[in-house]
Amino acid sequence: MIAVLGLVVGVVVGLVVRPVVPDVVEPYLPIAVVAALDAVFGGLRAMLDGIFDDKVFVVSFLSNVVVAALIVFLGDKLGVGSQLSTGVVVVLGIRIFSNAAAIRRHVFRA
């Protein structure tokens, strides 16, 4: 319940305050969000499988975001930023859908 309340408060604060993302960080934000979603879905899957560990979740969450942003940053410096961004989104998307399928199988027994 605390997580849901925190989510609602965060969305309301975001809508009221309307934070501005600096132009320097803007290309990395979508990749960071997808990486964070991958960690969240992985954590939910681990929780349903009974193997959730909060330390592993926090490390996975932070490392996913940092590694994904670093890959995109290096791609930008090498001149292939959009290709590496697409690659990161595809890989993380596959992991998200894999975790979502496992969650579905666990919840619906199908």
Image (tube, rainbow, N blue to C red):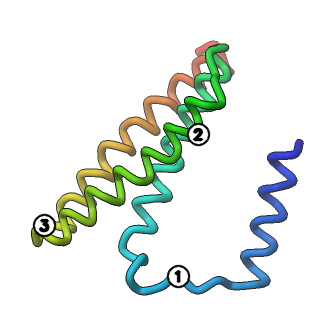
Element at label 1: loop
The residue carrying mark 1 is 21
In this picture, residue 67 sits left or right of residue 7? left
Q: Residues within 10 Å of mark 1 (few under 14, many from 20)?
A: few
* Residue nearest the viewer, comparing 19 with 99: 19
In the rendered image, which quarter is residue 98 located in?
top left
| Residue at image coords 45%, 59% | 32
Q: What amino acid is at disc 2?
A: Val
Question: Real-space Cα distance between discs 3 and 2?
Answer: 30 Å
Residue 30: x and y, percent?
Answer: 44, 65
Tell me: residue 9, above or below residue 5: below
- Which mark is nearer the camera, 3 or 2? 2
Q: What amino acid is at disc 3?
A: Val
The residue carrying mark 3 is 80
Residue 42: x and y, percent?
Answer: 53, 32
Q: What amino acid is at disc 1?
A: Val
| Residue at image coords 66%, 23% | 47
Q: Residues within 10 Å of mark 2 (few under 14, many from 20)?
A: some
| Residue at image coords 58%, 15% | 110
Element at label 3: loop
The residue carrying mark 2 is 58
